[in-house]
């Protein structure tokens, strides 16, 4: 028995025609973000483990239980990236990108790794497309990024998405909120799930994010960060909402949203899909992280970013996944004809026309059946007679029209077909 391998649990192949959707998503992102001045950055997929511990934080689910961490042959602790921001901040500091004029704007896309329970919309290797903007604290930058994200989703043709926003304060006002939360949860600490009991000590904000039903019950009526924001944070958030209002960007203020990573400050946001997505309905999420660059030894640099989940975006576009057939199929009989077909195809392909050839020495009938099956727009037939006469038969499989033409006319006829 030969071994038969399958992909790992929670790790999927992306196959055509779905890859076409992925390409469309990436191309659209490139186009929209390009107009906003974002340039692509390609960080590595693995980093020193410490980078994620320090940025995402020990109280987050990602660091507590989801990291793919291993010791390499040089005895270093290495982790596969669970998200993109940490690497980009590391690159920003490492390459001294703060010396370039602010704001510095980057986008990225690629695989992320989290050891989560695989289910619809949740995988262990998944892909994110994200953007980061460094150097400006102005709430206009928050608005601009959110508007860009919504423009990207809109350009993809996605409808019925909702944008939720909150501010989670800064290093001035958050400590007081943490204490208020501790006071609120203290009497019922024993009823919280074990994770939340740990969170109570490390970072009680995380309790607000817990998916366990019982914890959801207990946190009803808990203090809201919006009640404890300092003056600066309050003004920043109000200004953001005003920008969105004047731009007509619809949003929902969600005072309960805290997000799952420790590095966020002030603005946090999420874009959710409709009910069709089930429980895993966040397509994109992000926020401000004004302290992270300096945390990694860079100059004090306000920053903001978001990441969108490719699988979830592709899932919403699913119905559109079709590979169009070739513009032309050239059936040929005999070696000489095959060479003629190959030459004609090469010339047409140079101009971008998609051409398939009837390789395999099959009968004309079976070649034509194949052309039909793959949805070819046209066929050209080259047999012995055609070679002799220099005149090839063609047929349009969509409208049934047909005719005969010399090599150059055939080339001209199909050189514009895509
Ligand atoms: P969720 O609440 O859905 O777990 P999250 O807060 O962990 O999301 P982020 O870390 O903010 O997600 O990542 C941004 C986006 O990446 C999410 O909105 C989602 O679309 C996607 N994403 C996150 N984790 C996964 C996963 N395991 N599989 C597929 N997509 C994911
Ligand atoms: Mg998660």
Image (cartoon, grey):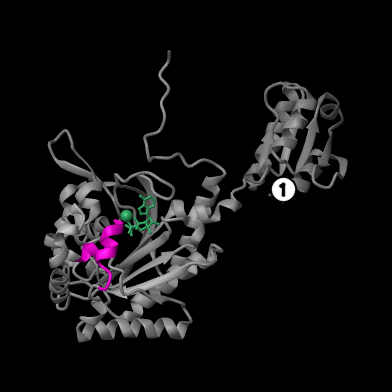
Q: Is residue 36 visible?
A: no
* Label 1 crowd (10 A; few <14 / some 14-19 / many >=20): many
Q: Residue 171: x, y in percent? A: 15, 74
Q: Specify whether residue 93 is in view.
A: yes
Would you say 403 lies left or right of 238 here?
right
> In the rendered image, which residue does mark 1 sit on?
415
Relative to the observer, which residue lies in front, 264 or 389? 264
Provide the major secondary structure of the magenta segment.
Answer: helix
Can you give x and y, in whole percent of width and height, for residue 189 in the image?
A: 15, 61
Q: What residue span does the magenta drawing correspond to?
A: 205-221
Residue 147 in the image: above or below residue 373: below
Q: Is residue 334 magenta?
A: no
Callout 1: CB less than 8 Å from ligand 1:
no
Q: Which residue is located at x 14 percent, y 78 percent? A: 172
Name the residue nearer the viewer: 408 or 41: 41
In front here: 287 or 299?
A: 287
Image position of 302 (left or right of 32): left
Direction from residue 210 to residue 143 in the image, left or right: right
Q: How many marks?
A: 1
Q: Which residue, as the protein is rendered here, is positioned at the far top?
A: 1
As helix, strand or loop, the secondary structure at mark 1 comes to loop
Question: What is the x, y in percent for residue 9?
Answer: 37, 36
Choose top left, top right, bottom left or bottom right for residue 163: bottom left
Q: Quadrant of residue 230?
A: bottom left
Which residue is at a point 75% across and 21% down the rendered structure image?
334
> Is 93 placed above or below 380 here?
below
Against 267, is 1 above or below?
above
Q: Is residue 116 above or below residue 56?
A: above
Q: Quadrant of the N terminus?
A: top left
| Picture quadrant of ligand 2 | bottom left
How far from the left and from the top, in percent, is residue 311?
45, 51
Quadrant of residue 272 in the image? Answer: bottom left
């Amino acid at each position: 028995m030969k071994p038969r391998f399958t992909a790992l649990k929670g790790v999927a192949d992306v196959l055509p025609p779905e890859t076409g959707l992925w390409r469309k998503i990436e191309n659209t992102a490139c186009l929209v973000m390009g107009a906003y001045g974002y340039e692509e950055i390609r960080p590595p997929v693995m980093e020193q483990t410490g980078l994620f511990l320090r940025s995402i934080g020990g109280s987050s689910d990602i660091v507590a239980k989801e990291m793919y961490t291993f010791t390499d042959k040089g005895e270093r602790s290495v982790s596969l990236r669970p998200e993109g921001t940490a690497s980009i901040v590391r690159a920003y500091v490492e390459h001294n990108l703060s010396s370039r004029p602010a704001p510095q704007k980057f986008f990225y896309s690629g695989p992320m790794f989290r050891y989560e329970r695989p289910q619809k919309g949740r995988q262990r290797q998944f892909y994110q497309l994200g953007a980061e903007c460094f150097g400006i604290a102005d709430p206009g930058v928050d608005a601009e990024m959110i508007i860009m994200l919504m423009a990207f989703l809109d350009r993809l043709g996605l409808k019925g998405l909702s944008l939720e926003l909150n501010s989670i304060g800064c290093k001035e006002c958050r400590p007081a909120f943490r204490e208020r939360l501790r006071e609120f949860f203290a009497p019922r600490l024993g009823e919280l799930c074990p994770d939340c009991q740990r969170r109570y000590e490390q970072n009680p904000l995380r309790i607000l994010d817990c998916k366990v039903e019982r914890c959801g019950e207990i946190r009803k009526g808990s203090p809201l960060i919006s009640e404890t924001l300092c003056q600066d944070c309050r003004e920043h958030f109000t200004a953001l909402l005003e920008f969105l209002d004047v731009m007509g960007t619809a949003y929902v203020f969600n005072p309960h949203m805290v997000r799952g990573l420790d590095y966020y400050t002030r603005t946090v946001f999420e874009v959710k899909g409709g009910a069709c997505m089930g429980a895993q309905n966040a397509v994109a999420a992000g926020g401000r992280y004004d302290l992270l660059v300096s945390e990694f030894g860079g100059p004090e640099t306000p920053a903001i970013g978001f990441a969108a989940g490719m699988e979830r975006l592709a899932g919403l576009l699913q119905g559109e996944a079709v590979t169009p057939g070739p513009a032309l199929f050239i059936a040929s009989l005999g070696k000489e004809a095959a060479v003629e077909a190959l030459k004609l195809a090469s010339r047409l392909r140079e101009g971008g026309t998609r051409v398939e050839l009837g390789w395999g020495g099959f009968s004309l009938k079976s070649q034509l059946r194949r052309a039909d099956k793959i949805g070819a727009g046209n066929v050209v037939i080259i047999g012995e007679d055609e070679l002799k006469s220099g005149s090839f038969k063609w047929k349009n499989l969509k409208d049934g029209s047909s005719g005969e033409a010399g090599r150059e006319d055939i080339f001209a006829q199909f050189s514009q077909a895509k």
